[in-house]
Image: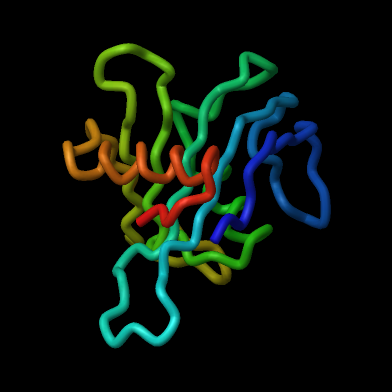
């Protein structure tokens, strides 16, 4: 099921006591899918896929995607560690980069994460391509 497929924008200002994704405006093309199957006995560790790509408009979040991921999770009621985060680098080779967030600690209500980036594995690339096919042809993505 598609949760979001469109351009996700931010204006670079602080609202509701929340820091902005970046202090300058920007936007990314974002696709969020729920790959869980209702009634299935075995649950996926990462039932959601968030595929995001630069639009060329405004500030890039590629170097530090934590605030972006936290805001996406807040807006769509997701758990950051249960999402497969994939950045589409829009290149011919090594097009997809998987970003992992591992909780390292908390202070009051603020969580801190270790961020690791790696090239997408072949099976992940196949799943991403299935997701993109689903979005264009509405077939089962996962």
Which percent across, then down, holds residue 25?
74, 26
Which percent across, then down, holds residue 35?
42, 63
Q: Which residue appears at 36% of the width and 43% of the height?
A: 130
Q: Quarter holding the C terminus?
A: bottom left
In the figure, residue 115 lies in which quadrant? top left
Query: In the image, 119: left or right of 58?
Result: left
Q: Which residue appears at 68% of the width and 17% of the height?
A: 57
Q: Quarter holding the N terminus?
A: bottom right
Which percent across, then down, holds residue 132?
45, 38
Decide: is 95 above or below 67: above
Given residues 1 and 16, the one toward you in this image is 1
Q: Which residue appears at 51% of the width and 35% of the height?
A: 52
Looking at the image, the residue that sits furthest to the left is 122
Decide: is 106 above or below 38: above
- The image's colour scheme reads rainbow
Query: In the image, 9: left or right of 113?
Result: right
Which percent across, then down, holds residue 90?
43, 18
In the figure, residue 122 lies in which quadrant? top left
Q: Which residue appears at 35% of the width and 37% of the height?
A: 129
Query: In the image, 60: left or right of 75?
Result: left
Count of marks, rendered view: 0
Decide: is 52 above or below 113: above
Given residues 102 and 91, the one toward you in this image is 91
């Amino acid at each position: 099921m598609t949760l979001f497929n469109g351009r996700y924008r931010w204006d670079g200002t602080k609202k509701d006591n929340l820091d902005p994704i970046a202090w300058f405006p920007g936007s990314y093309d974002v696709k969020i899918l729920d790959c869980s199957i209702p009634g299935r006995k075995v649950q996926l560790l990462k039932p959601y896929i968030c595929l995001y790509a630069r639009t060329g408009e405004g500030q890039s979040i590629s170097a530090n995607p934590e605030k972006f991921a936290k805001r996406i999770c807040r807006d769509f009621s997701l758990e950051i560690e249960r999402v497969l985060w994939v950045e589409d680098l829009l290149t011919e080779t090594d097009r997809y980069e998987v970003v992992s967030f591992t909780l390292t600690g908390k202070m009051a209500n603020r969580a801190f994460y270790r961020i690791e980036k790696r090239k997408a594995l072949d099976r992940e690339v196949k799943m991403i391509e299935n997701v993109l096919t689903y979005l264009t042809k509405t077939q089962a993505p996962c």
